[in-house]
Image: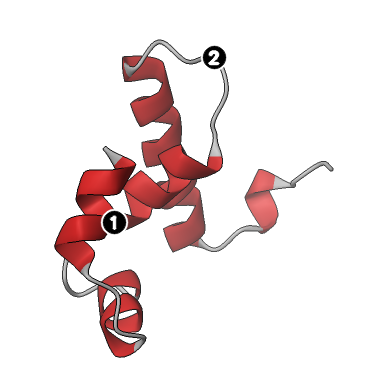
Amino acid sequence: MSIHFEKLTIKAQEAVQRAQSLAADAGNPAISPLHLLAALLDESEEGIIHPLLERIGANLGQLQQMVQ
């Protein structure tokens, strides 16, 4: 499946770039879903991910530990 990066929103592009950096820092040649999740969890509190996860009752601290 091919994703056209330029068709993503700015926020989505930023998340993918952060995921790519996390993967590279860990020595991984490819981005995995966990890299993307880690990038999304690292977003500031003003982002959409934290309130969304809190609304569904997710334990953010535990989720962040599991992803790390």
Colouring mode (rainbow / by chain / secondary structure / one colour): secondary structure
Numbered tag placed on residue 41 in the rendering: 1
The amino acid type found where label 1 is placed reads Leu
Residue at horizontal 45 percent and vertical 45 percent from the top: 36
Q: Secondary structure at mark 1?
A: helix
Residue 29 is tagged as: 2
Residue 17: x %, y % from top left: 44, 38
Please report the residue visible at 40 percent of the width from the left and 10 percent of the height from the top.
27
The residue most toward the top is: 27
Q: Which mark is residue 55?
A: none
Q: Residue at x 61, y 58 (%)?
A: 8
Q: Earlier in the sequence, mark 1 or mark 2?
A: 2
Locate residue 57 relative to residue 14 in the image: left or right.
Answer: left
Q: How many marks?
A: 2
Q: Residue furthest right?
A: 1
Instruction: Say what secondary structure mark 2 lies in.
Output: loop
Across and down, in percent, residue 49 comes to 34, 71
Q: Quadrant of the C terminus?
A: top left
The residue type indicated by label 2 comes to Pro
Q: Nearer the viewer, residue 47 or 26?
A: 26
- 26 versus 54 height, above or below: above
Q: Is residue 47 left or right of residue 9?
A: left
To which quarter of the image does residue 44 belong? bottom left
Report the side of 5 relative to 12 (left or right): right
Whether residue 25 can be seen here: yes
Classify the position of the N terminus by image quarter.
top right
Confirm or deny contact between disc 1 and disc 2 (CB under 8 A): no
Whether 11 is drawn above or below 48: the answer is: above
